[in-house]
Image (cartoon, rainbow, N blue to C red):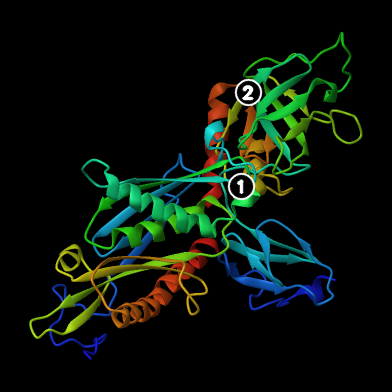
Amino acid sequence: KMEEDKGEVVGPVARDSVVLPGDVVGTLGSGKKMKLGDGIGQRGNDLIALKSGIFKIKGHKYWIDSRQKRYVPRIEDLVVGIVAETQFDHARVDIGSAALATLAYTTFEGFTNKNRPDLENGSVVYARVVLADKDMDPQLSCVTQSGKADGLGILAGGWTERGLSSALTRSLLLPDCRVLIELAKITPFEIAVGFNGRVWISSPSNALTIMIKMCILESEYI
Amino acid sequence: MEEDRVEGSLESREDGRNPNQLRQLSLEEDILTRADGSAKFKSGKTEVLVAVHGPTEVKLSDEIIERATIDVAFQKKSGSNDYKIREIEKMMRSSLESIIVSTLHPRTLIAVVVQVLNDDGGVLSAAINAACLALLDAGVPLKSTIASVSCAIREDEKGNNIILLDPSKKEEFNSKSSFIFLFDQNYENGIVGCSTRGFFTQDQYFNCLKASRGAVAKIFTFMRLSAEKQLA
């Protein structure tokens, strides 16, 4: 299946080439099934790039690979959030988007009225985006779809680094991420990578945490 | 009727250029660590730095329900902001509003901050080019890239009207009229905006537009080459 995708030219722009906003990357109405991803918009019957980046096609999915610092919430993203306000039944969490996200306490594993999550201003949480609409505040959950925490929830201790670009975040989430593999040979550590350009790091000492942070930041342009 | 010469004036310009020659362009992206996007655009000695913040939280009084609020703040190299700056900000804001897909980010703010680092003519054009690049750097969705070219009309001793592309500050000052044209990727078929100063005929306007149109192709090519170098 990969073979038939090779060198496919959908519109005037070849896949894996650099595009600027306004470039026509395809046309609708050819009877092909298309799934339009990040950075692709519609102008009449044409599909145009809305961002500068690399035009990607995989199967019937079309999108632009771009590098961005500001986070725009998307469903099913895993994000590192910092609690800004706590209310009776939910917390308002800063995930770096334009609006604060809502995290209901009922979305914590094993929640009962007697067993509430221990959240306060400044607490760090690893959560899943369950609602991301341009017209609404984003909503988070600290359980996966199965109902179990699976690593989501409160992150205690450690250091949260902000301001990673989307490109660096994606590279950290690859299964063969070189910098994390090499760091693991030096010291044991825990890490939570958020799609929102934030990384939570916990290691046996502060010096090691700083070292891990610097290695990760520097690895973007190696 | 006097014919306006676009090419090959007998008198060359002070910096040795032809009348339809742009100054040396240079651009840099992602310069500021704290901005979501930033870019510097240089045309000859004119240098403008633009930072973009957003989409970010917007003040309730400025909130628009169905789209993003776009705000432009323009800072000259020196001197206080006056009514002329307000006009520049308004012009930049309406140009950027026409290309930003603001409906993707309702109830947010996209702030564009312009700082003139050096003014040797063509500052508004450089600011618009830098703003477009900064928006690209920030990943703000745009319907098209835009680019801007300035030109001026000078009257020589013989009474000929000479069109000068990308005028320097001195050339702008000594000109009869000056123009700034904004184009999007569809530059063959129209303009996104224009701003004019001075006294000119309809023919002069269209000749300036034609000259600028020829030049903007170079600016778009330059932006594209720079993107390819950075991303590939």
- Of the pair A66 and B18, the residue shown nearer to us: B18
Horizontal relation, residue B57 to residue B93: left or right: right
Quarter holding residue B156: bottom left
Which label belongs to residue B67? 1
Q: Is A208 placed above or below B141 here? A: above
Is residue A222 visible to us here?
A: no
The numbered mark 1 sits on a residue in which chain? B
- Residue beneath label 2, please? A158
Q: Secondary structure at mark 2?
A: loop
Quarter holding residue A83: top right
Horizontal relation, residue B76 to residue B96: left or right: left
Which label belongs to residue A182? none
Residue B12 horizontal/vertical position (percent):
15, 81
- Of the pair B21 and B209, the residue shown nearer to us: B209
Residue at the outermost right position: A146
- Residue visible at 67% across and 26% down? A93
Locate the N terminus of chain B and report the quarter of the image it occupies: bottom left
Residue B150 horizontal/vertical position (percent):
31, 68
- Residue visible at 51% across and 67% down? B228
Locate the C terminus of chain B and report the quarter of the image it occupies: bottom right
Q: What is the three-letter code of the residue carrying label 1?
A: Arg
- Residue visible at 38% across and 50% down? B89
Q: Is A137 placed above or below B140 here? A: above
Q: Is A91 placed above or below A151 here? A: above
